[in-house]
Image: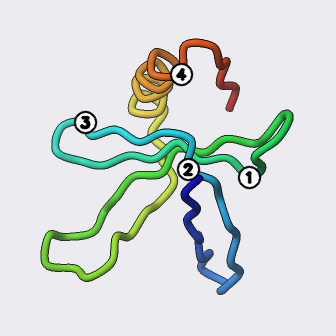
């Protein structure tokens, strides 16, 4: 399973497991969890990097409307999984 490392503003790094990814309205989104097993905390990350950037830059989706729409998409992609944020 692919992993990504999220670096917070204070420099703290956290590794997440990529459960699924999608592209909506020209933007890439990742559904990530903090654990591969059991009940895990989920987070949806949005790619805010530009095409010319060497590395992708992801930020957590905070807009409630955008988040709810993405939750529906990811739940459909993962039929047997309930996502609770």
Residue located 48% across and 39% down the image? 20
Instruction: Left or right? Give the position of 31 relative to 35.
Output: left
Real-space Cα distance between discs 2 and 4? 13 Å
Q: Secondary structure at mark 2?
A: strand
**Residue in the foreground of this view, choosing between 53 and 61:** 53
Real-space Cα distance between discs 1 and 3? 23 Å
Q: Residue furthest bottom?
A: 11
Answer few, some or many: residues within 10 Å of disc 4's Cα (few below 14, many 20 plus, some between 14 and 19). Answer: few
Query: Circles 1 and 3: CB distance less than 8 Å?
Result: no
Pointer 2 residue: 18
Give the mark nearer the N terminus: 4 vs 3.
3
Look at discs 2 and 3 and give the one toward the viewer: 2
Pointer 1 residue: 34
Real-space Cα distance between discs 1 and 4? 17 Å
Give the mark nearer the N terminus: 1 vs 4.
1
Query: Circles 4 and 3: CB distance less than 8 Å?
Result: no
Q: Which mark is residue 24?
A: 3
Residue located 59% across and 47% down the image? 32
Above or below, comparing residue 51 to residue 52 in the picture: above
Query: Circles 2 and 4: CB distance less than 8 Å?
Result: no
Answer few, some or many: residues within 10 Å of disc 3's Cα (few below 14, many 20 plus, some between 14 and 19). Answer: few
Answer few, some or many: residues within 10 Å of disc 1's Cα (few below 14, many 20 plus, some between 14 and 19). Answer: some
Above or below, comparing residue 56 to residue 73 in the picture: below
Give the mark nearer the N terminus: 2 vs 3.
2
């Amino acid at each position: 399973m692919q992993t990504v490392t999220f670096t917070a503003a204070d420099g703290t790094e956290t590794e997440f497991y990529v459960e699924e990814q999608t592209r909506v309205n020209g933007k890439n989104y990742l559904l990530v969890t903090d654990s591969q097993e059991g009940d895990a905390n989920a987070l949806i990350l949005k790619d805010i990097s530009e095409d010319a950037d060497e590395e992708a830059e992801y930020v957590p989706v905070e807009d409630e409307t955008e988040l709810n729409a993405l939750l529906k998409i990811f739940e459909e992609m993962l039929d047997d999984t309930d996502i609770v944020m």
